[in-house]
Image (spheres, rainbow, N blue to C red):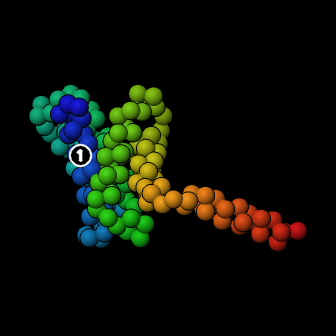
Amino acid sequence: MDITHFILFLAGGISSIATFVLQVNFKQGAVRASALIGVLVGVFVLLFPKLLSPYLTENLPLVCFGASFIGMVSSKVLSNYFLIGISGIIFTIIFLNTSTYFHGFGGGLGSAACIGLLVTLSIPILKKKGALSNGFLQLRRQMRSKSKTKE
């Protein structure tokens, strides 16, 4: 891993945490907090294009803006700063590995952010033995009870 990828991973984690802090602690709302992070990074890249490599100039705003979508999560769903930062890093991994395949498709940043957040949220479920099968059994019971009530 070279320094540019390390910078992108760091930026992804920090952007998601910063958005969450703006949303929760400073009461800015999810959309405003995400937009603020995107604008700040975009303006930084526009004002100082020679400071960064061309690769970072192109990808840093995308990573920061996409990772800021993770920070839009409700504090009722996830309130651990460490896990929000990990979700930002997972988003960056997904972005770096799929950006060439989805070039020109809309919604790629949001989809990758959603996947990164879902991966982080599923870690406690995967750590428990039998949790997945119990959840499947409960879903099956609910479907059966709904079909019996319709009859």
Q: Quadrant of residue 77?
A: bottom left
Q: Position of residue 95 (x, y in %)?
A: 37, 38
**Residue 103 or residue 44, whichever sits in front:** 103
Residue 96 in view, yes or no: yes
Q: Is residue 31 visible?
A: no
Residue displayed at 45% across by 57% down: 127
Q: Nearer the viewer, residue 127 or 66?
A: 127
The picture places residue 84, in percent across and down from the top left corner, at 33, 57
8 with respect to 72 (left or right)? left
Q: Quadrant of residue 97?
A: top left
Q: Is residue 146 left or right of residue 86?
A: right
Give the residue type that dot 1 points to: Ala
Residue reaching furthest to the right:
151
| Residue carrying label 1 | 11
Quadrant of the image containing the C terminus: bottom right
Q: Nearer the viewer, residue 109 or 149?
A: 149
Image side of residue 114 versus residue 68, left or right: right
Task: Identify the residue at image location x=45%, y=40%.
Answer: 108
Please tell me which residue is depicted at 33% across the width and 58% down the height of the picture.
83
**Numbered circles on residues, count:** 1
- The residue carrying pointer 1 sits among few (fewer than 14), some (14 to 19) or many (20 or more) residues within 10 Å by Cα, namely many
In this view, the residue farthest toward the left is: 51
Measured as percent of width and height from the top left, residue 5 is found at: 24, 35
Residue 21: x and y in percent read 26, 64
Secondary structure under tag 1 reads helix
- In this rendering, the answer to whether 17 lies above or below 54 is below
Residue drawn at x 11%, y 34% as measured from the top left: 51
Tell me the quarter of the image containing the N terminus: top left
